[in-house]
Image: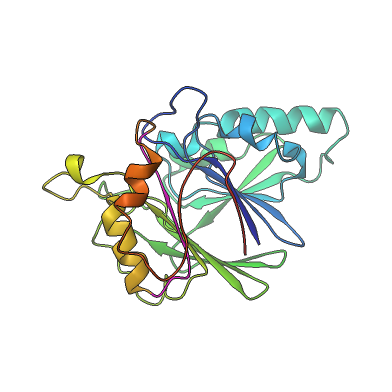
Amino acid sequence: MRVTVLGYQSPYPGPGGATPGYLIETNEVKLLVDCGSGVLSQLGVYLPIYELDALLLSHYHHDHVADVGVLQYGLMVHQLFGQRPADQPLPIYAPALQKQQTKTLTYRNATRFFPVEEQSQLAIGDVHVSFLRTDHGDGDPCYAMRLVANGKTIVYGADSGPGTNWRGFADRADLFICEGTYLDHNRPAKPNGHLSVRQAAELAQAHDCRSLLVTHLFHGYEESEVLGQAEAFVAGPVYAARIGLQIEL
């Protein structure tokens, strides 16, 4: 599997940046995980959008879904141009919520919405996907994803507070993509549905992960700060997310 960081910033993109979005490629499929602000323009560096096989959304906060509408428009145009068959809408897998929150995910012949819950299991080409509800704090579900293909495992933690039970889900992941929203100096005294860089590193180490990608970072953070506060993870390589970073598993 190959992971390409298309966006990682939050709560909004910095200059030339993008909020969360990750391209995951295997021998059989090309998956987009989350689709934040600026992600679509970064995706085009690596492949035409009409070659995507599926979009998986962790939750509906704006920084994770802001580019979904323009993705739909783009796919519609590529169908009109004959570059993607009109009978092959892009499947969007996302949390099952009230109709008014999910009805826009199906758009003409461009996309179709398929609801997922914590118990859902997906097979998309050679990728098996399972889900875990995270401690994201505001009542609406946010799902981490465990993606397994060709003997390798990626766990995408989405947005998560310290109350998430990762046992059995993140264990021995080849790559744990974990948010590090806060540095030590701005970590709130009361947990609010997000983790710090230091907490992300401690989690990855505790669950015997083989590598760690720290993401969901404010665009003003310095990479050296992020890596310095991820010192608790010593089991393998640590990456601070940046646009264009590629990790091969």
* Magenta region includes residue 249: no
Residue 136 in view in this figure: no
Residue sticking out furthest to the left = 189
Q: Residue at x 82, y 39 (%)?
A: 86
Q: Position of residue 227 (x, y in %)?
A: 37, 50
Residue sticking out furthest to the top = 15
Q: Position of residue 211 (x, y in %)?
A: 47, 64
Q: Position of residue 51 (x, y in %)?
A: 77, 44
**In which quarter of the view is residue 249 placed?**
bottom right
> Which residues lie in the magenta part?
208-218
Quadrant of the frame with the N terminus: bottom right
> In the drawing, does residue 126 fall left or right of residue 121?
right
Q: Specify the color scheme.
A: rainbow
Q: Residue at x 32, y 51 (%)?
A: 228
Instruction: Name the chief secondary structure element in magenta.
Output: loop
Asked if 19 appears above or below 226 in the picture, the reply is above
Asked if 236 appears above or below 3 in the picture, the reply is below
Q: Residue at x 37, y 40 (%)?
A: 217
Q: Position of residue 68 (x, y in %)?
A: 57, 34
> In the drawing, does residue 127 fall left or right of residue 171?
right
Asked if 25 appears above or below 110 in the picture, the reply is below
Residue 231 in view in this figure: yes
Residue sitting nearer the eye, 23 or 59: 23
Q: Residue at x 11, y 47 (%)?
A: 189
* Magenta region includes residue 214: yes
